[in-house]
Image (cartoon, grey):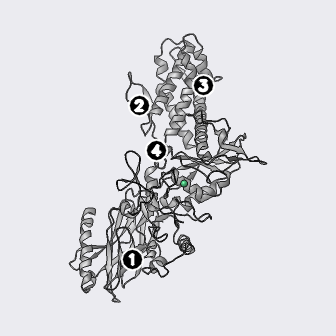
Amino acid sequence: MQKKLRKGYTSPVLLIGKINKKKKTISSSTPKLLMFFRSEDQAKGLPKEDKNASRTLTYLTNTIKDILEDKKYDQSFGFDFFREKSIGKNTKVYKIDEDKKGDYVINGNLYSESDTGITLEKLYDKTSLTFELVDGKKTYSIDEEFNLKKGKSSLIDKTYYAPNILIKPGKEVKIVSKLFDTDESSKLGQQVTFKFSNLKGIESYTQNSTFNKNEEIVEFKIKTKLNEVIDSKSTVSAIIKDAFGNDLEIGRLTILPNKVYEPKFIFVDTFYKKNTTKSNSNYNSLVNNINNKAFNQASINFVLGKNQILNVTDTDFPLKDSSNNIGKYFVQKSGTQDYETTQNDSLGNALKTITSKFFEKMSEEILLEIEKSMQNFDVNDGTTTQKLMPQNKTLKDWFIQYSQTPNASSTAIKWYDRLFEGLCDYIDEMRFGFYPMFMCNNIIATKDELAVGFTRDKGLIIPSNAFSDVMTIVHELGHCLGLRHTFDKLNHEKGDVKIKPINTLENIMDYLTNGTTNHSKNFMTYQIDRMRENSERLKYNVEDMGFIIEKETIANPPQTVVKDFNGNKTIEDFSKKLCKYLFDSYEGIYNLQNTTKLYSHRDKILGIFVDIIKNYFKNL
Ligand SMILES: [Zn+2]
């Protein structure tokens, strides 16, 4: 059905063009165009010319503010109304790709600062086609780049046109459709049928509308199913019958996938050179703000995990780089208890250390849980039944005790460290669906640009002077979710889809240009798509982990191990080591001769480990 619709799609446009050049004949074959708008107010404003050619920044800001404060827009769905040229004259938008060598290219050629040209939407949505409405004097059209034009010139008010919509599951939205018709008769009676290319996730929608006159605005409703998601882009086509009784598409709306992602924020109150065990922070409203101001439009709803505390010192270093300790990045601010940054990449560098400290803390806590369980685990070893580990021994002590027996390997002493590092690696590699937000209570960014977080999918570091700056946090989260800037930083990084910084007040992945805050409020559709595609942490959460205990893939003889949904080898390796170290210690310390009975407990031990790790992350 989808194919058929598309096929019949190009010719009607041509047909319109041909007929237009002649006189209009009967109603059903006169040129028509149907557009969707977010609200009636916006639909009323169109089409009109840009009467004020030199619209000011203030004007644009206010216009956009009006849109955002429109009561009908509850931020539960996202529209792509910030488009090329909507944000200032001569604003060029283009896309930069990476070639195999990692160089930035445009159209296959190396990128240079002076490049301009191809537009974002042309590349972004290749399915768009031209719709045109001509009545002899006026020609309105939506071109391939979703620009609304009068004749050859773009209309600035095309910004209100809604080509894309994202609706959360179980939500009904009311938008409007507006018919532009060259038949000016007062009793038009134009029937329009709306057809979905795919009804998955759609509960109900307005199937037919009647338009009685040109430029009439009619409500259009879509309701999504609560328990079924739209998992790929689909389209709503507005169909009329042409003079020969064939379907003719006169307008289109793209429906974006709407699975709601619910990643978890773990706010980690981080203290530098100050031992603290308590936090008074309540991050509830911050999470709500982050969701409402930006992420709900992408069907992302961050949930609040439990607060954590992390104390770091100046001698801390990241797990894999012992030369790079944190001390050089901060200096005490004179006359205060606070520390300020020493250089412009202090925060980014500190983030690596702080993140690995956090993973270490988690690993320790998980190992402590394992220890407790093993102290309570009954083993029938063939001659007696006793606990796998004595209650007065820690895991570390137990391994060390074994390593000191005459037959022990000298490497046994490193067993605890190996388990510890294995867990750290696993947490680092895994996408558990949580984001650590390191709220640095006694660190102030002075040399840095306020707050830094470009470590993809690894979390954010937020100095105390940025705690209340929601849009900066949102911007950094954009980076975490795989977005680049829309501008280039000299000698630093290339933007992805580049938008000239001029007046890009409503693009979150730009910097604020006029010195005031809280301007940037929206992600553009390509950014929403990219975040949803790029972030592993959005896709997985602890419920999806699906650990199983089964024979490992390659081993001789094969052993049962713990596997996760992601086929991650680290977890298999960890589970193998855990059993080996526990059994070897038991055997050695109790001088066990026959290990058959002991080894029969393997699956049960792994089962306990799975429960521990699942519960640990579930309860964060
Ligand atoms: Zn940035």
The answer to whether marks 4 and 2 mark residues whose Cβ atoms lie closer than 8 Å is no
- If you read the primary sequence from the N terminus, does the residue marked by circle 4 or circle 2 appear first? 4
Q: Which mark is residue 550?
A: 2
At mark 2, the secondary structure is strand
User: Residue 44 at x, y = what percent?
Assistant: 45, 80
Residue found at x 49% / y 39%: 429
**Looking at this rendering, what residue extends furthest in the bottom direction?**
186
Residue beneath label 4, please?
Answer: 544
In the image, 202 versus 339, the foreground residue is 339
In front: label 1 or label 3: 1
Q: Can residue 480 be seen?
A: yes
Residue found at x 20% / y 78%: 244
Residue beneath label 1, please?
Answer: 153
| Left or right of 282, for residue 97 | left
Query: Residue type at mark 4?
Result: Asp
Residue beneath label 3, please?
Answer: 395
